[in-house]
Image: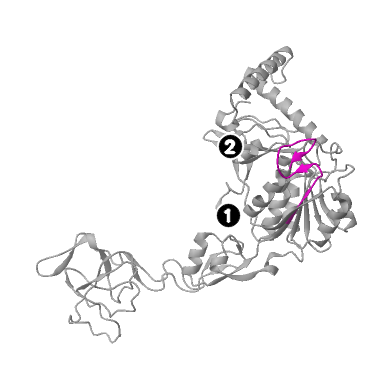
Amino acid sequence: MTHDREAEGIDGVEDALALALVGRQLARAHARPHQDPGAGPDRARSAERERHDEHDEHDQEDRHGSRGPGARSAPTGRPGAMPWSDARALASRAARSDGACPSARARRVPLDRALGLTLAEPLTALTDLPSFDTSAMDGWAVSGPGPWSVGGDPAAPAKKTGRAGRKPSPTGILAGQGESEPLPDGMAVRIATGARVPADTTAVIRSEHARTDSTGHLHAAHALTPGQDIRSRGQECRSGDRLLPAGSSVTPAVLGLAAAAGYDELLTVPRPRVEVLVLGDELLTEGLPQDGLIRDALGPMLAPWLRALGAEVVATRRLGDDAEALYRAVTASEADLILTTGGTAAGPVDHVHPVLERAGAELLVDGVAVRPGHPMLLGRLPSGRHLVGLPGNPLAAVSGLLTLAEPLLRALSGRAQPAPYHAPLRDAVQGHPHDTRLVPFVYRDDGLVPLRFHGPAMLRGIAASDGLAVVTQGGARPGDELEVLDLPWTAPVDGGCFT
């Protein structure tokens, strides 16, 4: 497969190694018939490389389904694995079960504490916007046809209407002042942007479009249109209008709209609370890997990732391979979601399944037909809380995070799942014979460019990516439209979090 140098991030040494590998693969491709008689040498090299990478990826994940290099063996294949799209839908539904309904946890918070939360009720206007006719420009409020006598002098004659009001000052009508006297026919008065327009005003003339003659009369440079540069009362909304539906994310713009519409507080769904339990005796928290020990990549990564998904991370705890400690942590946790890393397979120290059984949990998802990440699981504890078990391999854990944890957290937050969207693929991607693949990619003008370093134990690809492309069984060819999973820091506003 061909890629941009920027997308791959390959240095000179790796380029040389890659060229040598391509040469060897090309020789092998010419030594035996290619299955696609219409494919040229480039397609042959690409397909061969994908088969080689795919074999390594599947083999590695089967060997290390519980966590990264050095992990205990896991069973190969899960005949009962749930289809990827079904697993995501089930995770979303699970969060809306009795006792976990977001609206049941809603509370009112001041505007300055609502950023990043979700509206638990529709945002309904408490007033007309604008609440009175206002000037859209600095200029002149005029009544009737011109030319106009310039007002603002307290001694100027006023039209007798019986309506009380403030007389314009010599400096005109300013924003923040109360109601002025009605403007007599044939009169003009200076007015500032945002100021309340006097009754009987025909239009506002911008300062740069008006001039006064030697007699003190005002003339318009252009033909006058009734109502021009006046923001009419209720132009944006009327009191009682629904501005936003429940489930909307509170963005900075939503805060501004809520304030303008008269709100001091908003009824919102609190952030779901998450506790992260990092498993594995082989994990180091600092320094270089040594003596069969490896660095914990998931502990530093998961908490900020979860916060970007809108969660409150109450703790990240490292438990090692201690079944009793895991049982105590799971059963004592008060978090809405418990997230474990590793230990989801069936090796001698993979304790997640036995602990869930002992705790009386209902196993909702036990394996997903996706690569990487197929040993992931989702359970519901008797307390109504949920546990997502992530594989220990880093990219496999990311797959589990986006497959099970993200839709569940979105539902717990009261936000609807966004409609999936698709983008065209630039380079072909080899498919798994049975499972969905999630492949890191970058956006380019000519389509999605899949990245190398997409093995289950690798983070180099996802660290440089814009998202994950969903590749169904059988793979995808250039030009195919693939579903896209955004990363929370590259997602649209609706999928993002403001913290």
**Quadrant of the image containing the N terminus:** top right
SS class of the residue under badge 2?
strand
- Judge whether residue 429 can be spotted in this image: yes
Q: Is 331 left, or right, of 255 in this rendering?
A: right
Q: Is 77 left, or right, of 250 in this rendering?
A: right
The residue pinned by badge 2 equals: 442
Q: Is residue 93 magenta?
A: no
Amino acid type shown at disc 2: Val
For the point 71% across and 48% down, the residue is 299
Numbered circles on residues, count: 2
For the point 76% across and 66% down, the residue is 99
**Residue 494, disc:** 1
Region rendered in magenta: 275-295
Rounded to the nearest whole Å, what is the CA distance between mark 2 and mark 1? 21 Å
Residue 11, position in %: x, y? 59, 27
Labels 2 and 1: the sequence-earlier one = 2
Residue 427, position in %: x, y? 61, 30
User: Is 388 situated above or below 207?
Assistant: above
